[in-house]
Amino acid sequence: MSLKLRDSKHIWHPLTQHQIHPHALGISSASGVYLKDDQGNRYIDGISSWYTAVYGHCNPKITNPVAMQMQTLDQVVFAGFTHEPAVALSEALIPILPYNQNRLFFSDNGSTAVDVALKMAIQYHHNQGVKKNVFVALDNGFHGDTFGAMSVSGLSVYNGAFEDFFIDVKRIPVPNSENLSEVLKSFEELLQEGDIAGFIYEPLVQGAAAMHIYPADGICALLKLCKQYNVLKIADEVMTGFGKTGTPFASDQITIKPDIICLSKALTAGLMPMAITTCSEQIFEAFLSDKNAKGLFHGHTYTANPLACCAALAAIELFQTTEIQQGIQLINRAHLAFEAKIKTHPKVDKTRVLGVIFALDLETQMDRYGSVRDQLFQFFMDNGVFLRPLGNTIYILPPYVITVEELEKIYKTIEEALGIL
Ligand SMILES: *Cc1c(COP(=O)(O)O)cnc(C)c1O
């Protein structure tokens, strides 16, 4: 029996309406920028498998050290114990993070990184005898699928069944040059209420909101206000981290630095699931006490798994090589050239580029997971390119090791797709 049919007997897939999409495509291997299905067809991974495998799939520079680590220490409790991969990772990561970050708290995925950040923020105030338990978040933000992360997410079309259980979140529009003074005013009014624990934002680009890119100035002004009102600034860099926006972190392009940063996705180069919530020493110190209860009593079984830490360490080393940094610049230049060419196409409404991210909005309005979107997706796959359009937005976020020829192939396929619409 084919993989597809065996799959459909027992497996429940994420973000999938099984009645409409009963079959998943069997993928048998991946190498570099290519995915290969069980029929032998190859696809360029144009979105780095949800922004994770940015150094290419099965990169021996990542897999070899992890294979070695596997022989030495596979897993150990991280409460009361520590190990070389975690410590070495901390020593490699802290120097490349925004200057005020000094502590790492490990968890398993982007959503848990966000939940940890929210708990840190609430308890930071609680430990000082202050009750602040409301968050402010941006319209159309996406922060994950656990209850806390879902609550702060503003893309709630699919969360209807759970809304009664959300934590208290106030929402403001993404600031831009036109609305800034208005947004600042309503933000300050919220902060004046005195119960805001933290402000969470995806710096510079909201990924799930169809790669919505916004300028640094506006968000910087909001962050300045957070400082003034002792509201913690939480940057969700789960998507933007590790070079996506052209700098190591999107926060590098914003003058006011976050108190807390959420990292996952490219952190482990697509090899192992892991996340880190980083924070400034000031946050950490608020949890120090001779009372146990003031500590952060949050811990997952696989916290700081040695194999995942080893993958992350190898990834950071690769990230800092000139080869990878040149790859990021090459992609950016190619995207800009493609943008200049495609933006006047009659089927194209808007285009944008930031770092390795390219996005274009089609003239037609369509459902986020509707049929035209499915038709586009299939067209790309039939032509050997894996892209996942979001509604009427087609975007690319390729692995940093992609070649000019492979990028051209993606661009050409997108141009041809515009022709079938
Ligand atoms: C993907 C993503 C998350 C959630 O991460 P998971 O690993 O899927 O739980 C959170 N925030 C942002 C910005 C993301 O892109």
Image (tube, rainbow, N blue to C red):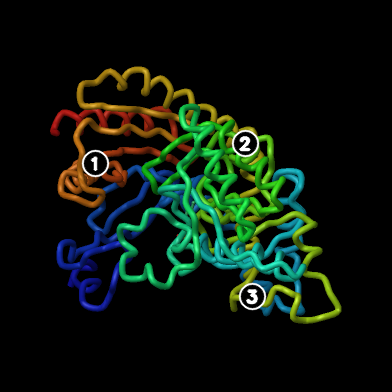
Of residues 192 and 172, which is closer to you in this image? Answer: 192
Of residues 194 and 6, which is closer to you in this image? Answer: 194
* Callout count: 3
Q: Residue 23 location in percent, x, y?
A: 19, 64
Name the residue tied to disc 1: 380
**Residue depth check, mark 3 versus mark 2: number of the one nearer the observer:** 2
Mark 2–mark 1 Cα distance, whole angstroms, equals: 40 Å
Name the residue tied to disc 3: 298
Regarding mark 3 in the picture, which secondary structure is present there?
Answer: loop
In the image, the residue with mark 1 has its CB under 8 Å from the nearest atom of ligand 1: no
- Residue 357's place in the image compared with 64, above or below, is above
Mark 3–mark 2 Cα distance, whole angstroms, equals: 32 Å
Name the residue tied to disc 2: 221
Question: Do the CB atoms of the residues marked 2 and 1 lie less than 8 Å apart?
Answer: no
Going by the numbered disc 1, the residue's amino acid type is Phe
Of residues 32 and 138, which is closer to you in this image? Answer: 138
Quarter containing the N terminus? bottom left
Asked whether residue 68 appears in the rendered view, the answer is no
Quarter containing the C terminus? top left
- Residue 113's place in the image compared with 338, above or below, is below
- Residue 384's place in the image compared with 37, above or below, is above
Q: Earlier in the sequence, mark 2 or mark 1?
A: 2
Question: Do the CB atoms of the residues marked 3 and 1 lie less than 8 Å apart?
Answer: no
Going by the numbered disc 2, the residue's amino acid type is Ala
What residue is rendered at 74% in x and 51% in y?
101
In the image, the residue with mark 3 has its CB under 8 Å from the nearest atom of ligand 1: no
Going by the numbered disc 3, the residue's amino acid type is His
